[in-house]
Image (cartoon, rainbow, N blue to C red):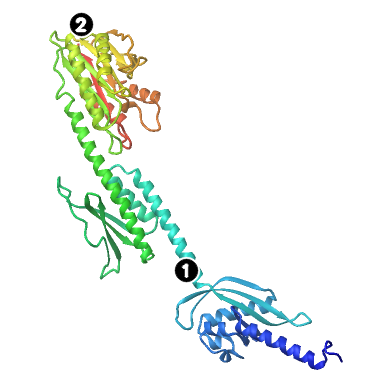
Amino acid sequence: MTRDTPGVGGAERMASSDSAMLETLVLEAPVAFAFYDTDMRYRRINRMLADINGAPMEAHIARRPSELLAPPLGLAIEARLAEVLRTGQAIADDDFRAPSPITGELRHYESQWYPARADDGSVIGVAVLVSDVTDRRLAEAALRRSNERTLRLQQATSALSGALTVDDVRRVMRELGQSAGFATRTEIHLADLSPGLVVDAPDELMSFAVHPQTGERSVEVALVVSGGLIGSLRLVLLDSMSDHEDESFLGALAGQCAIALERARLYERERSTAVTLQRSLLPDRLPDAPGVELAARFLPGAGDADVGGDWYDAFSLPDGRLVLVVGDVMGKGVVAAAGMGRLRSALRALAFVNPLPETVLNGLDRVFTATEEADQIATLVYMLINPEARRAAVGGAGHLPLVLVRAGHPPELVDAGSGSTPLGWAEPRGQRTLELGPGDLLLGVTDGVVERRGYDLDAGLSQLMECVVSPEGDLDSLVERVAATMLGHTEGRDDATLLAVRFLG
């Protein structure tokens, strides 16, 4: 026998070497391993799985998992073994969960269960490979929570960006807390924000509390902007909100809420100023003229709509004639209201010099071009009423038509310049004269009366005419009825103005 040809002793040594290598792989492999016989008893186990089970390797041999491990872990292992022995099929379990026998902490495992077969194909046991993936599962869960918090914060930022008023902010935060699943109740408490008063932010911006009787968990977060403390956000939390990362989310959420509140407070202050200015520029009362009846309404827009430049005017001339005007300065807020004031003053001055519609409108074109910004737009309809002659000279600059209701006839639209250009877009202005009789009525409105979201202008004008089909009763009641019908909606409604004149018998 040569050195290169192993004999029986060499074969035995090689088999022994293979067995030692296999033993080493089983015992020292970086994955937990066990082998069970058909009676589901441990035959082999390595140190890693023994450590997971919290018992020495030798304590496992010849024992079933339920004899060694407390439920539910032992019973769950035997259920897997029984399935493999019955079906002869391998099983891969990506998320086998069980309490640790050592710490009691819930652990996550990935496991593969393989049937071991004899030469004749019969199943003689089950081999299992187990990996503890608890840390990976926790990291994945933390990443999911982080992504969910980021999405919630994006949703909050988007929703709060559309909140115009403080009440809007309260509503959005309440709905977010419930729909996003982090709070059962949301409250906003505003600090004393008297003019000139600055409240410093507290040292602790966030504090948690537990109700002693109900166990209800809540958090109160200071709402801080550059000007100081403006209030606090209180959330009654769901049980899922507990860790440090959630504190970061709550702090960011409160920051977005504070920005929205400050913006809403500024909007409400400016809106209040604009409404006050707008109302102060309207006539205190309508003129009392023989032969005609007058009625008017001005309604500022809804809380979720900006204040515009809607206006009306009614005044008597020295010769007994009346000037009635309904107008709209495009734009929002104080700027539009101030522009309306300038336009009203110029119109009155021009009307006292020469009240004919075409003359006043041509003069307003020149004034408007000289005093207003190039991108400013204003429209109006102008009525010069002669009560004694029952005559109305009308003209307009890009405004809506008048509604004319002749006694005993259906309402009609009267073009008083709706096809013309707005003020400042100078063109030769014209006028038309209407001969009217007892009971005849003229009504002028701004677009806030006939236009709103989801409805076009023609539909609005048709509805307006339906409202005045039966103009019986006093004129003030009629205008009130028209306003209630046309402006019964509130969401997004713009400023609205109505001015009506009826000739008496």
Q: Which amino acid does label 2 sit on?
A: Ala
Q: Is mark 2 on a helix, strand or loop?
A: loop
Q: Residue 27 in the image: state x and y as whole percent.
A: 61, 85
State the residue at coordinates (40%, 30%). 455
- Tag 2 residue: 389
Q: In which quarter of the image is residue 482?
A: top left
Q: What residue type is labelled 1?
A: Leu
**Residue found farthest to the bottom:** 9
State whether residue 350 is above or below residue 253: above
Inter-mark Cα distance, 1 to 2 = 89 Å
Please name whichever residue, 380 or 483, is drawn nearer the observer in this view of the structure: 380
N-terminal of the two: label 1 or label 2? 1
* Mark sitting on residue 339: none
Q: Residue 478 in the image: state x and y as whole percent.
A: 24, 24
Q: Can residue 504 be seen in this view?
A: no
- Tag 1 residue: 138
Please name whichever residue, 293 or 115, is drawn nearer the observer in this view of the structure: 115
State whether residue 266 is above or below residue 136: above
Please name whichever residue, 464 or 103, is drawn nearer the observer in this view of the structure: 103
**Residue found farthest to the right:** 1
Would residue 204 appear left or right of 246 to someone viewing this image? left
Would residue 90 appear left or right of 144 to someone viewing this image? right
State whether residue 38 is above or below residue 492: below
Q: Nearer the viewer, mark 1 or mark 2?
A: 1
Q: Residue 348 in the image: state x and y as whole percent.
A: 18, 16
